[in-house]
Amino acid sequence: MRTNFLTFSKHVPRWSFRLLASVAIVGLLTFILKRVESGLQIQLIALLYLLPVLGCTMAWGLTFGIIAGFLSFLAFNYYFIQPYFTLTVHQTQDLITLIVFLLVSIVVSQLVGQARAAERLAKKREWEAMRLYELNSALAGLTEVRAILQTVALKLVETFHFQQVVISAVSGAGTNPITSRFPQEGDLKEPCDLSLSMYTARNTEGEMRLWFDQSDLSLEETRLLATFSNQAALALERARLFKQEQLARVLEESDRVKTSLLSSVSHELRTPLAVIKASSSSLRSGTIEWDSDARRELVETIDEEADALNLLVGNLLDMSRIEAGALHPMKRWNSIPEIVKGVCEKMHSQLRRNPVVFDFPHGFPLVPTDYMLMEQVFANLLSNSIKYAPENAPIRVSGKVENEQAVISVHNQSPHVPEEHLEHIFDKFFRVTQADKITGTGLGLSICKGLIEAHEGRIWAENRPDGFAFNIALPLMAEGEPPKLPGDETDG
């Protein structure tokens, strides 16, 4: 019996059920009121007949509310207005009551119908706004085209219950479009049921291809689908512009670095080369005796400027190795004071006006380091200190053990660096002072940072009451081995 009813209901329009239900509700109410008529006043019966009007309007809309109102009007007249069981009205008061009832039922049904329509519209708008908010939230922050396509396809299936969604994005001239499909399984019949272009005010970003069962979309779904298409196009455009911006920023930074490098290196190369050329020309002129002090001074000048060129070239090579990730320190147990002393011997002519003072505690432990790389670090730090420290002001190199780390400080009496510059002082080509006042490429401190970090340590700068200091912290453990004291080392 149930099966027959379901089969019958599929072939009967929905409005016919609602019409029959309206008639049944009015009839049921009439039956109940007729049974208790003796205890009710005519005005109360008229008010009770408004209940089917309200119910049908709220349940099925304004049309069925008006139908229920008209049926209630007829039933009220037929069963409760004298003469009974006829639609004739003899008394003027009864006629007025019927007319007022009909008008009230129509007005009430219209008001309730409008309220219900407004409620349905509000719910549809809320549904559209929520779906659109979910899409925008999912797309926010995505900069990869494939991720955007996958997100949009997923949201389309979740929102509209499409069988299949295929989205293609234009990837550029001469290249295949990027395509995303959801769900992945299942065969695709051709042609698709609906195709939408995703475009912005500037150009077309891609295409949506949709497969679905329903023969037509509702007006609200069509409007929301068009909004989805526009939002997807904007997201793809944003990803493309973001990629172009990143490329432009990289090219701009590369051009800036290239310009800074050429400017700094050309200046730094020209000065020592000019000095070497002048000294060698003086030696070749034959006017200087071989055993004279002038000859020894010229040879020493050539040697110092060659060391400066060697340091510059070494810095450039080290920077290229650091940026390429090809720097791997050969760690051995080394004495930091001995490394610094070796650097001071090589830079003795530059350190004439700024003597180096050592302050290391007795028994300062050996540190696992690469000897040559640490020489480069201290050479750059001492060279920087010489540039900024006052004449005859000593440079203090000290060390201590703290938290299983060797902390080494290179302290000079140079002016303080502004606090906002401290965090950038180790950036490439960053110069606190103007380039025409202090020479240098601006790579030395950046290289120091890279070399120290390759040793799993850290380097930082700080202003002190009596000057400025570079601090280095290096781990004392080497692959689980405890720190060694001077004299315990087995490796040079």
Image (cartoon, rainbow, N blue to C red):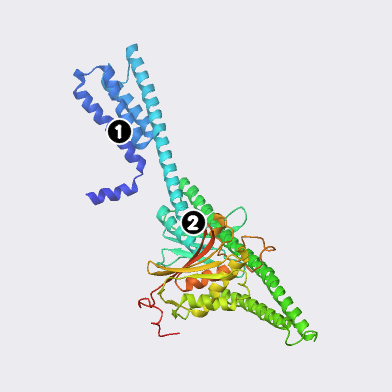
| Left or right: residue 18 compared with residue 438 | left
Q: Quadrant of residue 305?
A: bottom right
The answer to whether residue 119 is above or below residue 208 is: above
The answer to whether residue 375 is left or right of residue 405 is right
Q: Position of residue 329 (x, y in %)?
A: 48, 78
Instruction: Choose between 282 and 151: the one closer to the eye.
Output: 282
Asked if one can make out residue 190 in the rendered structure from this viewpoint, the answer is: no
- Viewer-side residue, 399 vs 423: 399
Q: Residues within 10 Å of mark 1 (few under 14, many from 20)?
A: some
Please state the horizontal and vertical placement of residue 334, each as a whole percent of the image: 45, 79
Instruction: Name the outermost residue toward the top.
Output: 92
Residue placed at 64% from the left, 76% from the top?
308
Q: Earlier in the sequence, mark 2 or mark 1?
A: 1
Q: Which mark is residue 141?
A: 2
Position above or below: 310 against 257: below
The residue under label 1 is 23
The residue lying at 35 percent from left, 43 percent from top is 14
For numbered disc 2, what is the local secondary structure? Answer: loop
Task: Give me the residue at 42% from left, 32% from top.
Answer: 114
